[in-house]
Amino acid sequence: MNYRHAFHAGNFADLVKHAALLQVLARLTAQTAPLTVIDTHAGRGLYDLAGVEAKKSGEADAGIARLMAAGDPPEAFATLIAAVRKLNSGGPVRRYPGSPWLIAEALRPGDRYLACELHPDEHGALRELMKARRGVQTVCADGYDAAVAQTPASGQALVLIDPPFERADDYARIVETLAAARRRNRTAAALVWLPLKDLETFDGFLRDLEDAVEAPLLVAETRMRPLTDPLKMNGCALVLMGAPADLAADLAGPLEAICGWTAGSLGQGGAGRVYAL
Ligand SMILES: C[S@@+](CC[C@H](N)C(=O)[O-])C[C@H]1O[C@@H](n2cnc3c(N)ncnc32)[C@H](O)[C@@H]1O
């Protein structure tokens, strides 16, 4: 496990993932039923953009720094921008929230959040960050296994899957995990983040998911540049599985705005695209 998210925190892919996640959470927490969120790959929860890793990669400078400086970003980014402002007390952006911080802030009393992180150091930081939060549990464990074991048998559930894709079997494990989660709970929803390198890999994943899981899919692609070099991360995709039809329809516009702005303003000749399967 070499991956450290501190190098990538606040990059274009985080902006897309986190703005979309907040849009999904806003709609799920507007329902009366309690919500359970399982975050299979949680990371440490909070990132120091003045730290060695962020400075070395420069990814946050090309991502969140540009979003915060943008004159008129789409409304769909407003909750993320407000969260970053809050975390930095309105001052210069030095800290960037990970999914745990954003989820914990969005949940209501009575909701539940399980954050899984396999790396002991990252989990130690996460546990410390989350220790005073009610309804939040962190585990130093494999997130795929935890999602299969802990998806509640009924009620509103959202599984967030955001792996580092260091391992060749991540695509297969995502499909297995979502199929198992849906067997446990027919209404469980999931938001999956994936890199876009070449289209063959991504299309293959979508086909496998459609074969394994009987659930509607909403796909949001952010292509930062034409996909001509399969060795590069040319963009990212989000797949929302199992959202009720009215919620998915309501999300399409904000997701188009998020992907379109990110590709158009931060990319090099790319584009955003949202479609249902
Ligand atoms: C992309 S980062 C997560 C970022 C986080 N979701 C966010 O948005 O702030 C992926 C994390 O997954 C962890 N990880 C890798 N394999 C894992 C596994 N099988 N189960 C749980 N965590 C894992 C890595 O240590 C890393 O911190």
Image: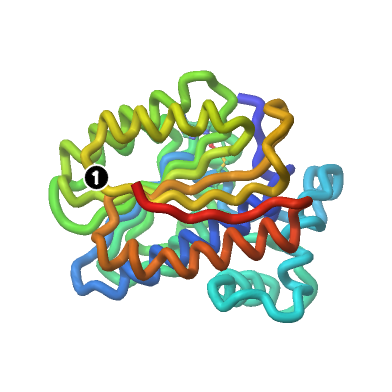
Residue 34 in view of the camera? yes
Q: Residues within 10 Å of mark 1 (few under 14, many from 20)?
A: many
Location of the N terminus (image quadrant): top right
The residue sitting at 17% across, 45% down in the picture is 185
The residue sitting at 30% across, 36% down in the picture is 178
Q: Say above or below: 151 vs 246.
A: above
- Left or right: 175, with 120 as reference point: left
Residue closest to the eye, 104 or 197: 197
Q: Say above or below: 261 vs 211.
A: below
Q: Tell me the element at label 1.
A: loop
Q: Where is residue 75 shown, x and y percent of the image?
A: 56, 78
Instruction: Please name the residue that numbered disc 1 is placed on.
Output: 215
- Count the marks: 1
The residue sitting at 68% across, 50% down in the picture is 9
Query: What amino acid is found at the position of numbered circle 1 in the picture?
Result: Ala
Q: Say above or below: 5 vs 86.
A: above
Q: Where is residue 82 shown, x and y percent of the image?
A: 60, 77
Residue ranking furthest to the top: 168
Residue closest to the eye, 263 or 190: 263
